[in-house]
Amino acid sequence: MVQKIKDPICKMEVNITKAIKLTQAGVNFYFCSENCRQKFFKQSSVEISATFGNKAIYTCPMHPEIEQDKPGDCPKCGMHLEPKAASAGEEDNKEARMLARKFWIGLILTIPVLFLALGEMILAFSLKAFVPSNLSRWLQFIFATPVVLWAGDIFFVKAWKSVLNKSLNMFTLIAMGVGAAYGFSAIAILFPNIFPESLKIHGEIGLYFEAAAVITVLVLLGQLLEAKARNRTGQAIKALLGLAAKVAHRIRDGKEEDVVVDQIQKGDLLRVRPGEKVPLDGIIIEGKSTIDESMISGEPVPVAKIEGDRVIGATVNQIGAFVMRTEKIGSETLLSQIVKMVADAQRSQAPIQKLADQVSGYFVPAVLGCAVVAFIIWSIFGPVPALAYALVSAISVLIIACPCALGLATPMSIMVGVGIGAQAGILIKNAEVIEKCEKVTHILTDKTGTLTAGKPQVTATITANGWDEKSLLSIAASIEQSSEHPLARSVVDYAKEKGYTLALVDGFQSVTGGGVKGKVNGKVVLLGKQKFIEDNRVSLPEESKKKSDEFQEKAQTVIWVAVDGQVAGILGVSDPIKKTTPDAIRALHKIGLKVVMLTGDNEKTAKAIAKELGIADVYAGLEPKDKQEIVKKLRSEGAKVMMAGDGINDAPALAEAEVGVAMGTGTDVAIESAGITLVKGDLNGIVKALRLSRGVMRNIRQNLFFAFIYNALGIPIAAGILYPFWGLLLSPMIAGAAMSFSSVSVIGNSLRLRRLKL
């Protein structure tokens, strides 16, 4: 029986297996169409909460202690608040759409302002023939006004809130600089006669509309990119939630019905067929199968399950069918716990923007103080008209202190650095990753798919008397071609690579957790574990047993092959170490980093690989939570941890570490949880990423020096400190030029990064 549910928008009943599911504020909703889902999202979060009685909690990524029950801005830093609850739906990004609209309209209006301003300075004579100077000045005013007062209004609102909350930040600086440039220019247009003739050039006061408009558009672009980046961090959560089964086959009173997983209760009996996902965590009470648990263990080999064994929700059932009793639901399931761990770890990371806010906390009051002092001194002691001189001096201080260069100092270096990384196959998620890479002391790495290739391969063959490699592999691959086991596929692929012929199989049987058997060319073939062969009353030669032990000591899985009651040989199957891994490990050791292996594989295999690679610290048999706990422990001891992995099981540890590194050949969840993705899956990329981070951070510090040196030298001059000695008063135009030169210095220095050798 298929369950029917009602669409909350159009009220139509829809088959739950065909409905579009959406999770909002921890509540699941189902829709008959994408159109209804979109309409649902047009309601505000507050309306949704009021309608469905479940309020979302919003928090600041930079200040997790800030929480409220509606969207808004952080009272401390001005950053847009984000919902704490994980959601599998694609929520409308109103902030990004609003910023994009303001940016593009602001950019279109800024272009003519910039052209007119530069035209007056560079092409003064020719331009006046087409656009008279007075008309040009008014056109700049007309075009710049909506850019500053409409597109940039959000910065003034955030700045005002920062003043009210006594928490000055970057938005305070931005509003102050843009407001000073625009306000001075607007006064010069509307009331030109209040300025002394000595401050005029060709009878006109210099305008700074282009500076106000350009700064507004640049900051809007930065905010837009930041909003999009924050949305991408949520993709890891959405990918994890997307793994869960949506419908389960519940058995009740001897009848089977399809129901939504959310309606399953503890103790319910569920049937799981081949190829389906396990709906929830529980215990098998009937049947047996093999289950792909790579999302938990990271290991590619499926695990045999019989009655009494535990199964985990979202893992994939393979060849058998079984009935399970549900033991954990909702937030109790392992998948839900992984989702929570990833979300908590992501929110706990401190963004790099905190540095700018800390600087602003001291810089903003200092600039305002200088401007006020300059205004008061000039008002009292300045020449007539004293008020005009006081205004010019104060405005010059504010303009030269405009945070344009400060705003570019980090983004320009990051932009160039990220581009260099991308060319080298290193994808960097955000700026804070680069900052944290520089301080890394420990490299924690998964085994399968990170140090190794992640694909089992036949690495050795030992034949018994009367058999050669060709005949052994041909008969082994023939019977294995009917099996879906990854180890079976490795045998088949190896035989095909050798060009050996495969025969048809009669009476094929698969014994869960043991092996396979059947007839090939009339001969009875047994293939599988040593115990499976022994249980079928086949005697094992001592020489073969010794070779088997040797294989296992080298971290190889042993496959026994018997034909007509006699051992034909054994195959060694292993997950080979990537060719680039040894050099990468040596390079990491050389630069003084401690390398630690974390794996869900058995201890014997893990230690064998670690010994070969020269890794001293090994943790084996780990679950996702164990890996995350090790990362937490090391961090609590003062270590700066970089975690490298490629599987879903690595996601919590990747998010918990200062820096997570995912292999580009790994799962989407691992990639979304990590701060860095190595496109080629080459561990040497970590060495390059560390070199890149050090170069970028060095460049950022240089940029910050350039951004502040002009302020440190220019603010006293703009305030009029040279006037009593040489009669020099810094014109706002010169202040604007100094501000621009500091920005040019920052940009030029950032572009030097392109010569960085990785």
Image (cartoon, rainbow, N blue to C red):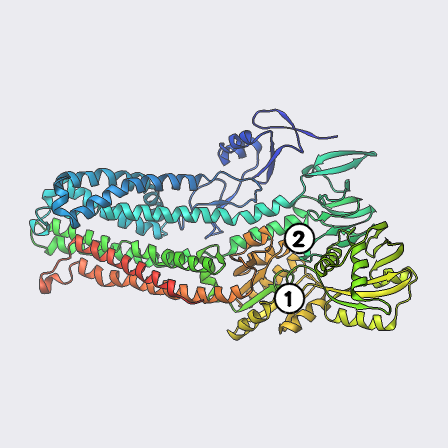
Q: Relative to residue 50, is residue 474 drawn left or right?
A: right
SS state under label 2: helix
For the N terminus, the quadrant is: top right
Q: Is residue 720 left or right of residue 18?
A: left
Query: Residue at (43%, 42%) from the top-left corner?
Result: 96
In the orientation shown, which residue stands out farthest toward the right? 537
Quadrant assignment for the C terminus: bottom left
x then y, percent, for residue 71 = 46, 40
Amino acid at pointer 2:
Met
Q: Is residue 414 above or below residue 153?
A: below
The tag on residue 109 is none
Which residue corresponds to the image point at 40% horizontal and 58% vertical from the top-left? 414
Q: Residues within 10 Å of mark 1 (few under 14, many from 20)?
A: some
Q: Closer to the observer: label 1 or label 2?
A: 1
Please report whichever mark, 1 or 2, sits nearer to the chain's N-terminal start. 2
Horizontal and vertical percent for residue 474?
79, 59
> Observer-nearest residue: 732 or 524?
524
All told, the count of numbered labels is 2
Instruction: Name the image quarter holding residue 622.
Output: bottom right
Q: Position of residue 289 (x, y in %)?
A: 79, 49
- Local SS, label 1: loop
Amino acid, disc 1: Ile
The residue beneath circle 2 is 295
Which mark is on residue 577? Answer: 1
Question: Taking 479 as reference, is 542 above or below it?
Answer: below
Q: Is residue 735 visible?
A: yes
In this rendering, does residue 164 appear at all? no
How far apart are the alpha carbons under marks 1 and 2? 21 Å
| Left or right of residue 615: residue 65 | left
Residue 195 in the image: above or below residue 678: above
